Image (tube, grey):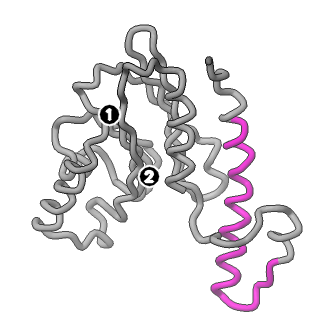
């Protein structure tokens, strides 16, 4: 789903002048937080910080990170962090480099929660007369190769626990498409 996040960011960036540079990225840092699934030790954070340094992005959509305290273990104090507040260990967030000069307004996009799934994070970044709007998401996982039309989802067999889980994931992912399309439709049109 990271490609989807980048698609929104890149579409919005086209309104900027070519002299302005803004590097954006998306990173799913699996299970980064205080919960038992995070088995990382100090050396792991050193390695993650090296990757973050090489990434050198101004805006980073983050998935599966508990909060800004955990994100700062990887990205340091150079960023401001914005996260959804749903009581969920795998949150969606965005890191914005402080030196980029952007003012940030963040709003949770709760419409993506179609039943025990993550919120999105709708951000508007402004700098002078420039404005960038993006939606950071981590859509429902577990539906990897099925079409999301009604016939495909409803006709999926539930012959095993795994198949039942996959059908549930595809059903939720399909339900997330409408709020995602609504967000896109409600976004201001791109300027040439």
Residue 49 colored in magenta in the image: no
Q: CA distance from mark 1 to mark 2?
A: 23 Å
Name the quadrant containing residue 45.
Answer: bottom left
Element class at badge 1: strand
The reply, left or right, for residue 94 in relation to residue 1 is: left
Element class at badge 2: loop
Residue drawn at x 35%, y 54% is 65
Residue drawn at x 24%, y 73% is 39
- The residue beneath circle 1 is 96
111 vs 65: above or below: above
Residue interval drawn in magenta: 156-182
Residue 95 at x, y percent in the picture: 33, 39
Residue drawn at x 28%, y 69% is 38
Mark 2 Cα shell of 10 Å, populated few (<14), some (14-19), many (≥20)? few
98 vs 112: above or below: above
Is the C terminus in the top left, top right, bottom left or bottom right quadrant?
top right
Mark 1 Cα shell of 10 Å, populated few (<14), some (14-19), many (≥20)? many
For the residues carrying marks 1 and 2, which lies nearer the camera in this image?
Answer: 1
The reply, left or right, for residue 111 in relation to residue 10 is: right
Closer to us: 21 or 6: 21
- The residue beneath circle 2 is 87
The reply, left or right, for residue 188 in relation to residue 83 is: right
Residue 165 colored in magenta in the image: yes
Residue 46 at x, y percent in the picture: 12, 60
């Amino acid at each position: 789903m990271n490609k989807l996040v980048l698609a929104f960011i890149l579409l919005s960036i086209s309104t900027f002048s070519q002299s302005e540079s803004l590097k954006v990225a998306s990173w799913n840092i699996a299970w980064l937080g205080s919960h038992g699934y995070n088995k990382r030790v100090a050396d792991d954070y050193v390695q993650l910080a090296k990757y973050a340094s090489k990434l050198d992005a101004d805006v980073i959509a983050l998935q599966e990170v508990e909060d800004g305290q955990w994100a700062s273990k990887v990205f340091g104090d150079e960023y401001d962090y914005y996260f959804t507040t749903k009581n969920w260990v795998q949150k969606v967030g965005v890191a914005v480099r402080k030196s980029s000069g952007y003012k940030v307004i963040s709003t949770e996009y709760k419409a993506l929660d179609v039943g025990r799934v993550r919120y999105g994070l709708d951000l508007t970044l402004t700098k002078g007369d420039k404005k960038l709007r993006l939606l950071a998401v981590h859509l429902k996982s577990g539906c990897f190769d099925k079409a999301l039309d009604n016939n495909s989802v409803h006709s999926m067999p539930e012959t095993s626990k795994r198949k039942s889980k996959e059908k549930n994931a595809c059903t939720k992912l399909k339900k997330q498409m409408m709020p995602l399309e609504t967000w896109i439709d409600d976004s201001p049109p791109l300027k040439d």
